[in-house]
Image: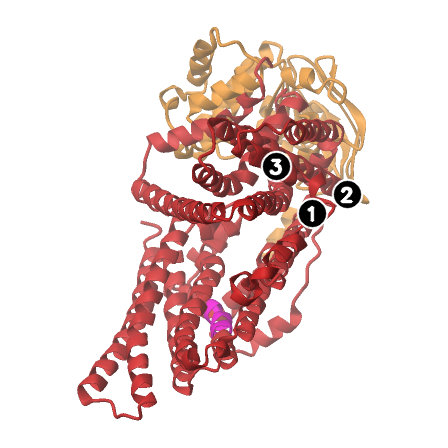
Chain colours: A red, B orange
């Protein structure tokens, strides 16, 4: 009972150490892939922010003003993100974590348990924000040739800034768990988070940031930034963090804002602890209750599936997969965010003003049609990695049911493929046809786009299904984690490579065709042969990606017991 | 040693535990029996300090679980039915962490860990990751952790699940030795042979209420006295004609 709260975090540290010591096959490749991608993204952020800051510095006072405003807005965005992230994370760390049953049975004082779980929540809720903020603040500091105390200020400001929303988020979770059953609270939190993300996407688009790039609207730039200011901004911790760092950037110490940030972080943490002292055990106790769940029986769905001309086992698998998906709020609710992103995507094409450069508009429109094809395929990959890749893993510990039943693994995997393909195909075709229509692309390109995305959908869904079977994670705590696993990242890398090669193979024949059509010239026979070859190569690549992935997936499932 | 008074746990309108009284004296092995869904695990979890009761009082070694939870838990060893173990820790690391939770001094800890691992025949697995353990080994490791801090009372939920005959024999021996040293053991189980063989007192719970209590002989007498084995006695007391129904259904 003499140990301080960090002792309770030791299993995490020891587990990481043991994992590193006892490397398994593929661990180095995994670490290399994740580390490489992480470093690349950090480097990209660093270079972009460094360049941007460097440019701003050339504008004397305006540059300084924009930098100050930028810092404040950067922190404001992350403040809201952190608050929502903390609410969801706190539900898991304080109420649903498996190890709590071990810790709560031991004579661990409530305060120590609170501080250890709070530290864990801070770590889990903020690592992504910190990974983004560190290269940004480093780049700003280096571009401004900031003095050393700036870096010390960064190190001191970030934990205080992160602690405030996490304390608020944890308190909200405590309240929710005491009012609703934990599993219902999780659904409510998921929906709240998604609605928040949706509004953020729509809000950012509604601000019409493209105005900043328009030469004609330069005088409005300061006005644009001024609209981002509001009377409540100076009362928020994001403003204090931004001001503290801005002052440190110029070698000053802003005691008022630094003090406000530090004392608020301390006060909020203490208030959260008092709340947990009083209501935690009651909330945790309530979270263990297995209340009767409310769910929809989905009878029309069952009736519709029973009419499908499928084998009984395929009908059974399809009905099971759809019911599980539709009854899990964490699954279907993400479609709302997808809808918002699709709406913004299509809106972008609607407002694209290509007529400003009339002599180029035809070329740009057709080039955009290819960018659109690539973008739609990227959207498709992102949807596939989230919904199709985890399809096999989604069976979880219940996979024994499939393995012990007389269903062939190929039939099982094909069922997963078709269940994933149909909605994705619908989305991909809808996006391509609508955006090309809004863009006013050439009819030939519309046709190529429609056919290409059809074939690519088969390949990408096949790749996701097959790789999902090759890299299953049946022991996941949350199905959304599967997309971020090694297999998920590897799928995304392969999908991007596939899309680039496909678009490359199609772009040349299409541009050649349009060029000749524009000049009303016949295409020479040798060119025609090359163009056909390119088209066939694109088709061949898709067929190979699709069939090889599915075959490998089936083999991997059949070998699971070996 | 373990005193449970008027324990009630209500979920909505459902009374999972209904006015349960229990007393487990030092050195006593008290069996807690009941059909599925009778309220055994809920009661056990409340006694272990894992769930908040709706009403009632639990006292362990003179410490009230509601008012002095840390002191009460420090005297208690808990073996849950579905124990959580950190899969990426070794057996030795888990026990060192557990010792820290119970405030055991570092001085002499290595010897104590070696001793307890030896007792449960896990010595040569001390440096191995828990994820490589069989179910029975994990069960024995949980017991190592529960007995590590020399508790005055132990609460066990289904101790024999997943153990092979040798493991089951070992656990029975250890429980008897602990009981001989004055440790109070409250044991929930479905294995009636184990209860018959080991328990000094048995409480039978059904529908959240204790419907019968006594030694095996007293329960036999309560059920009519013609049965030697505990199974028919249990079925008679809990109204279980289910066996015949199952037979008919098959």
Q: Position of residue A48 (x, y in %)?
A: 43, 49
Q: Which residue is mark 1?
A: A185
| Disc 2 to disc 1, C-alpha distance | 8 Å
Whether residue A520 can be seen here: yes
Q: Position of residue A195 (x, y in %)?
A: 65, 57
> What range is drawn magenta here?
A419-428
Give neighbour class at mark 3: few <14, some 14-19, many 20+ (Cα, 10 Å): many
Contact flag, marks 3 and 2 (Cβ < 8 Å): no
Q: Residue B230 got which mark? A: none
Give neighbour class at mark 1: few <14, some 14-19, many 20+ (Cα, 10 Å): many
Q: Which residue is mark 3?
A: A243
| Disc 3 to disc 1, C-alpha distance | 36 Å
Q: Residue furthest left?
A: A526
Seen in the picture, residue A69 relative to A346 is either above or below; the reply is: above
User: Split into 4 quadrants, where in the image is the N terminus of chain A?
Assistant: top right
Contact flag, marks 2 and 1 (Cβ < 8 Å): yes
Residue A194 counted in the magenta span: no
* N-term-proximal mark, 3 vs 2: 2
Q: Nearer the viewer, mark 3 or mark 1?
A: 3
Same chain, marks 2 and 1? Answer: yes
Task: From the viewer's side, name the closer residue of B118 and A7.
Answer: A7
Task: From the viewer's side, name the closer residue of A84 and A65.
Answer: A65
Q: Secondary structure at mark 1?
A: helix
Q: Who's the residue at 61% across and 36% down the image? A: A243
- Chain letter for mark 3: A
Q: Which residue is mark 2?
A: A179
Seen in the picture, residue A289 relative to A272 is either above or below; the reply is: below
Give neighbour class at mark 2: few <14, some 14-19, many 20+ (Cα, 10 Å): few
Q: Who's the residue at 38% across and 77% down the image? A: A452
């Amino acid at each position: 009972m003499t140990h301080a709260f960090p002792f309770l975090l030791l299993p995490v540290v020891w587990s990481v150490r043991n994992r590193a010591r006892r490397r398994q096959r593929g661990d180095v490749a995994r670490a290399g892939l994740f580390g490489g991608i992480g470093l690349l993204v950090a480097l990209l952020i660093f270079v972009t922010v460094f360049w941007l800051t460097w440019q701003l510095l050339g504008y004397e006072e305006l540059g300084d003003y924009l930098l100050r405003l930028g810092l404040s807005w950067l922190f404001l965005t992350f403040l809201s993100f952190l608050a929502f992230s903390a609410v969801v994370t706190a539900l898991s760390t304080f109420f649903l974590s498996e190890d709590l049953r071990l810790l709560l049975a031991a004579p661990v004082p409530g305060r120590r348990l609170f501080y250890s779980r709070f530290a864990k929540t801070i770590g889990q809720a903020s690592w992504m924000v910190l990974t983004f903020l560190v290269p940004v603040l480093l780049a700003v500091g280096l571009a401004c040739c900031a003095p050393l105390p700036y870096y010390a200020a960064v190190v001191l400001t970030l934990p205080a800034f992160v602690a405030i929303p996490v304390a608020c988020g944890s308190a909200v979770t405590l309240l929710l768990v005491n009012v609703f059953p934990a599993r219902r609270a999780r659904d409510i939190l998921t929906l709240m988070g998604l609605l928040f993300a949706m509004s953020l996407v729509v809000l950012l688009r509604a601000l019409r940031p493209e105005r900043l790039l328009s030469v004609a609207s330069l005088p409005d730039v300061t006005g644009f930034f001024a609209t981002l200011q509001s009377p409540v901004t100076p009362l928020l911790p994001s403003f204090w963090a931004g001001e503290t760092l801005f002052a440190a950037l110029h070698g000053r110490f802003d005691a008022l804002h630094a003090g406000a940030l530090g004392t608020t972080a301390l006060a909020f943490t203490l208030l959260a602890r008092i709340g947990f002292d009083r209501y935690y055990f009651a909330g945790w106790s309530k979270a263990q209750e297995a209340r009767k769940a409310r769910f929809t029986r989905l009878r029309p769905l069952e009736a519709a599936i029973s009419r499908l001309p499928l084998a009984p086992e395929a009908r059974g698998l399809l009905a099971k997969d759809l019911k599980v998906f539709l009854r899990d709020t964490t699954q279907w609710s993400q479609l709302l965010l997808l809808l918002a992103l699709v709406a913004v995507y299509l809106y972008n094409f609607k407002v694209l003003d290509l007529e400003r450069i009339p002599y180029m508009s035809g070329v740009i429109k057709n080039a955009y049609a290819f960018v659109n094809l690539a973008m739609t395929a990227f959207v498709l990959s992102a949807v596939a990695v989230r919904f199709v890749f985890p399809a096999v893993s989604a069976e979880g510990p219940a996979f024994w049911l499939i393995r012990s039943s007389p269903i062939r693994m190929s039939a099982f995997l094909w069922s997963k493929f078709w269940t994933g393909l149909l909605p994705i195909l619908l989305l991909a075709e809808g996006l391509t046809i609508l955006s090309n229509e809004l863009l006013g692309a050439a009819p030939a390109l519309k046709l190529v786009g429609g056919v290409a995305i059809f074939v690519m959908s088969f390949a990408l869904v096949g790749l996701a299904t097959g790789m999902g079977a090759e890299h299953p994670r049946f022991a996941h705590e949350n199905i959304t984690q599967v997309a971020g696993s090694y297999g998920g990242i590897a799928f995304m890398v392969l999908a991007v490579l596939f899309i680039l090669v496909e678009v490359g193979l199609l772009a040349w024949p299409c541009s050649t065709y349009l060029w000749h059509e524009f000049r009303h010239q016949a295409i020479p026979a040798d060119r025609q042969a090359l163009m056909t070859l390119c088209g066939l190569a694109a088709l061949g690549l898709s067929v190979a990606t699709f069939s090889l992935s599915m075959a490998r997936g089936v083999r991997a499932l059949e070998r699971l017991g070996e | 040693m373990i005193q449970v008074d008027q324990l009630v746990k209500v979920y909505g309108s459902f009374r999972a535990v209904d006015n349960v009284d229990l007393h487990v004296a030092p050195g006593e092995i008290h069996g807690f029996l009941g059909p599925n869904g009778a309220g055994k695990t809920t009661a056990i979890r409340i006694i272990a300090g894992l769930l908040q009761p709706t009403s009632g009082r639990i006292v362990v070694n003179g410490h009230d679980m509601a008012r002095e939870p840390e002191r009460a838990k420090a005297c208690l060893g808990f073996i849950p039915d579905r124990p959580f173990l950190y899969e990426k820790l070794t057996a030795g690391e888990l026990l060192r962490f557990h010792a820290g939770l119970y405030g055991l001094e570092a001085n002499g800890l290595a010897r104590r860990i070696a001793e307890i691992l030896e007792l449960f025949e896990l010595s040569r697995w001390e440096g191995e990751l828990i994820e490589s353990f069989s179910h029975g080994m994990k069960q024995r490791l949980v017991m190592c952790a529960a007995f590590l801090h020399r508790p005055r009372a132990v609460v066990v939920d289904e101790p024999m699940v997943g153990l092979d005959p040798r493991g089951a024999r070992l656990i029975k021996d250890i429980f008897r030795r602990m009981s001989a040293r004055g440790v109070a053991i409250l044991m929930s189980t479905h294995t009636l042979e184990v209860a018959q063989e080991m328990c000094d007192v048995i409480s039978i719970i059904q529908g959240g209420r204790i419907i019968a209590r006594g030694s095996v002989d007293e329960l036999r007498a309560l059920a009519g006295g013609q049965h030697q084995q505990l199974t028919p006695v249990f079925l008679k007391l809990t109204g279980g004609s289910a066996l015949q129904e199952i037979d008919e259904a098959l």
